[in-house]
Image (tube, grey):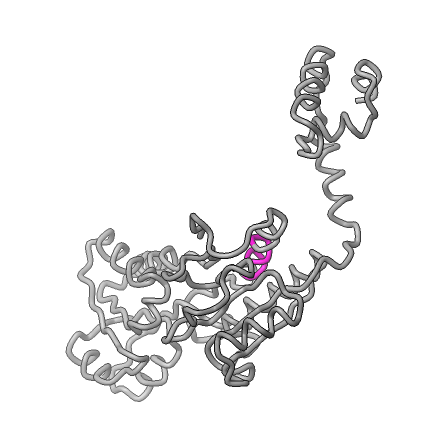
């Protein structure tokens, strides 16, 4: 790089930035540097680049600003550390701190806040970017001040308005559940789900289950509950006689516990590994961290409001 700089009469720093594609260097200068480097036989050292990236990542970042983490359904006390929302928040806090941002958490149900009050509080706290969690069966208020903030939803995708979202691969989880159980010899694999919960996930768990059952050549057995109520579940089990039930709710375990013929239960969203329980422990902490990365990117690009194209 020193040779290229001397050849062109530029500083070492300018050549370094130009070769890295830094947009602060004009396109004409970047092209001039790249052509000179190629002509002089310059080749970047990938290992040195990796080392410098680690050095830069290890530097203490200064304060960049504040994020809002808004939990729409349920009060703060309802979310344990080992719940999905609790793990999302842990990842959000960790990544925000590493990126130089503080996190201001808001639980509208605790303080009976409407959309207008939420917007006013966010603006008063100097927040530019908002991460939304736990929409609940009623969804998220439609009349929020969308144009004033950058937004990311976590764990679910909004249909109106369509915002950027970071979620676990719920479909792959439903598919994996069937594959795992079929490998273990189960043929009568039932699925018990809440219509409201699955709708918030775009039908992903249900879609993964059906896809897995068809791939395995098995007949689907589905119990569909409304409003998280499992009335009639016991009768369904007696009639269908599943060997194992796939579900996303640990409440299903409690309902079936007193049955004379209790099927095995596979929980799609296990809070943590526990003896005697089978299922998938979703990497919610990492999802929360990824949501911060997406939000930081929006802020650095100056993007606010509803995006023209939703990314999930």
Residue 97 in the figure: left or right of residue 91: right
Q: Nearer the viewer, residue 289 or 126?
A: 126
Q: Locate residue 117, reporting x and y percent.
A: 54, 77
Q: Is residue 209 one of those drawn in magenta? A: no
Residue at coordinates 58% horizontally, 75% vertically from top-left?
106
Residue at coordinates 53% horizontally, 85% vertically from top-left?
110
Q: Nearer the viewer, residue 131 or 240?
A: 131
Residue at coordinates 69% horizontally, 27% vertically from top-left?
26
Q: In the image, is residue 32 above or below residue 147?
A: above
Q: Nearer the viewer, residue 209 or 224?
A: 224
Residue at coordinates 28% horizontally, 82% vertically from top-left?
230
Q: Nearer the viewer, residue 277 or 209?
A: 209
Q: In the image, is residue 72 above or below residue 30?
A: below
Q: Locate residue 296, reporting x and y percent.
A: 61, 53
| Count of labels in the image | 0
Q: Locate residue 147, reporting x and y percent.
A: 51, 59
The stretch of residues the image draws in magenta is 288-294
Quarter of the figure with residue 237? bottom left
Quarter of the figure with residue 175? bottom left
Q: Is residue 289 one of those drawn in magenta? A: yes
Quarter of the figure with residue 25? top right
- Residue placed farthest to the left in the image? 239
For the N terminus, the image quarter is top right
Principal SS element in the magenta part?
helix
Residue 12 in the figure: left or right of residue 72: right
Q: Locate residue 180, reporting x and y percent.
A: 35, 59
């Amino acid at each position: 790089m020193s040779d290229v700089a001397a050849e062109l009469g530029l500083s070492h720093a300018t050549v370094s930035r130009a070769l890295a594609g830094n947009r602060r260097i004009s396109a004409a200068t970047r092209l001039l540097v790249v052509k000179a480097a190629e002509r002089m036989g310059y080749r970047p050292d990938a290992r040195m680049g990796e080392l410098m990236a680690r050095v830069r990542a290890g530097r203490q970042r200064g304060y960049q600003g504040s994020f809002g983490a808004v939990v729409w359904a349920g009060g703060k006390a309802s979310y344990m550390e080992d719940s999905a929302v609790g793990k999302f928040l842990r990842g959000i806090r960790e990544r925000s701190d590493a990126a130089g941002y503080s996190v201001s958490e808001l639980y509208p149900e605790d303080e009976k806040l409407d959309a207008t009050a939420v917007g006013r509080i966010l603006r008063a706290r100097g927040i530019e970017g908002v991460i939304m969690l736990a929409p609940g069966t009623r969804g998220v208020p439609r009349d929020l001040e969308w144009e004033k903030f950058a937004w990311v939803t976590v764990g679910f995708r909004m249909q109106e308005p369509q915002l950027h979202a970071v979620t676990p691969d719920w479909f792959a989880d439903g598919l994996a559940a069937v594959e795992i159980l079929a490998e273990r010899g189960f043929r009568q694999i039932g699925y018990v789900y809440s219509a409201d919960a699955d709708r918030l996930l775009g039908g992903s768990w249900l879609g993964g289950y059906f896809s897995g059952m068809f791939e395995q050549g098995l007949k689907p057995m589905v119990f569909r509950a409304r409003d998280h109520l499992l009335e009639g579940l016991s009768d369904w089990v007696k009639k269908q006689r599943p060997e194992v039930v796939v579900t996303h709710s640990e409440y299903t375990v409690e309902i079936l516990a007193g049955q004379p013929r209790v099927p095995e239960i596979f929980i799609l969203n296990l809070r943590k590994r526990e003896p005697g329980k089978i299922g998938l422990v979703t990497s919610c902490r990492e999802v929360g961290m990824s949501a911060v990365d997406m939000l930081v990117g929006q802020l650095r690009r100056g993007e606010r409001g509803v995006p023209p194209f939703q990314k999930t």
